[in-house]
Amino acid sequence: MVRELSCKKLQDNVILSLTNWSLFPQYGNSCSTACAVIGGSGFLGRHLVEKLLDRGYSVSVFDIRQSYELPGVAFHLGDLCDKQALLPAMKDVSLVFHCASPAPASDDRGLFERVNIQGTRIVIQACIEAGVQACDKEKGLLTVAIRPHGIFGPRDPQLVPILVDAARRGKMKFIIGDGTNLVDFTFVENVVHGHILAAERLRPDSPICGKPYHITNDEPVKFWDFMSDVLVGLGYAAPRYHLPYALVYGLALLLWLLALILRPLVSFKPTFSPMRVALAGTHHYYNCERAKQDLGYKPVVGLKDGIARTVQSYPHLRQGA
């Protein structure tokens, strides 16, 4: 989800294509800035918190749960849609990173709408009410949107564990489609790097104000090659047998409709939804040239190295472990 916000006026237009965006003040490269990370207990959020601490920032976290402890980090627990719960986390804060979102694999449209749309609006309201020092008298609340895609890395609770679970149940033998579809997978440290670059460049006269930026590894890879590299790295066999994309998508659509019709009588959730089939069998990669030009962005970890570091971080998921 991305919220399109101009420098002059807050806009409530929502484009459902992004998961993360950030609010930034005019502070240059100062590392004494107090900041809040909303969704800081999550996969991306925790990596962001750790990097901010390394760079000398003062950090507080707001999330629905606390999943870890770090010296000097204050945790505030509550519902993102509860403005009164948010306000204490934003006290004396100059910088807010909003990276809370439901799990990417979730099919709950209502949850996405509540968190990514309604929740983001409430975050903006809370920032203004708490006096977050991210405002310019003439241009209002300064914002920039970060659009990562296919985030992976150590401590990822979704992609690798789900992939391994499917392999252990014998469900990773098949390739959907011809296997040539290109996808962007982005190592988590590169996403964090993009957020911080944006934070250090946003000021009232900055050309990045109010704009969205794609952040990727800038190395589109065949979807099934990436999956195979992770599986083989953990000791599992790579998928080998091809299934026609149209056939699998049609079956997934049929099962989804059947589940919808039978919902009043019986509840079941098909393993493959049309969305998941589309993600596995179609091209989806993005141009991050504007991030390179405006933010000075360049991936700090290459895809091959990122996969190796990710695989090494999951010894408990290896075949036979």
Image (cartoon, rainbow, N blue to C red):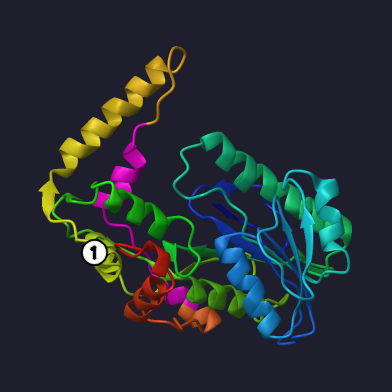
Left or right placement of residue 110 versus residue 275 in this view: right
Q: Residue furthest front?
A: 320
Please tell me which residue is depicted at 47% across the width and 13% down the height of the picture: 264
Q: Quadrant of residue 38?
A: bottom right
In the image, residue 181 above or below residue 217: above
Question: Which residue is at the front of the view, 279 or 259?
Answer: 259
Task: Tell me which segment is drawn in magenta.
Answer: 270-291
Q: Amino acid at mark 1?
A: Ser
Question: Which residue is at the front of the view, 292 or 272?
Answer: 272
Question: Which residue is at the front of the view, 258 or 16?
Answer: 258
SS for tag 1? helix
Numbered label tally: 1
Query: Is 87 colored magenta in this rendering?
Result: no
In the image, residue 304 above or below residue 4: below
In the rendered image, residue 30, in percent from the top left (x then y), is placed at 75, 87
In the rendered image, residue 313, in percent from the top left (x then y), is placed at 44, 72
Question: Which residue is at the front of the view, 308 or 297?
Answer: 308
* Residue indicated by mark 1: 228
Does residue 207 show up?
Answer: no
Please tell me which residue is depicted at 20% across the width and 38% down the height of the picture: 248
Please tell me which residue is depicted at 40% across the width and 21% down the height of the picture: 260
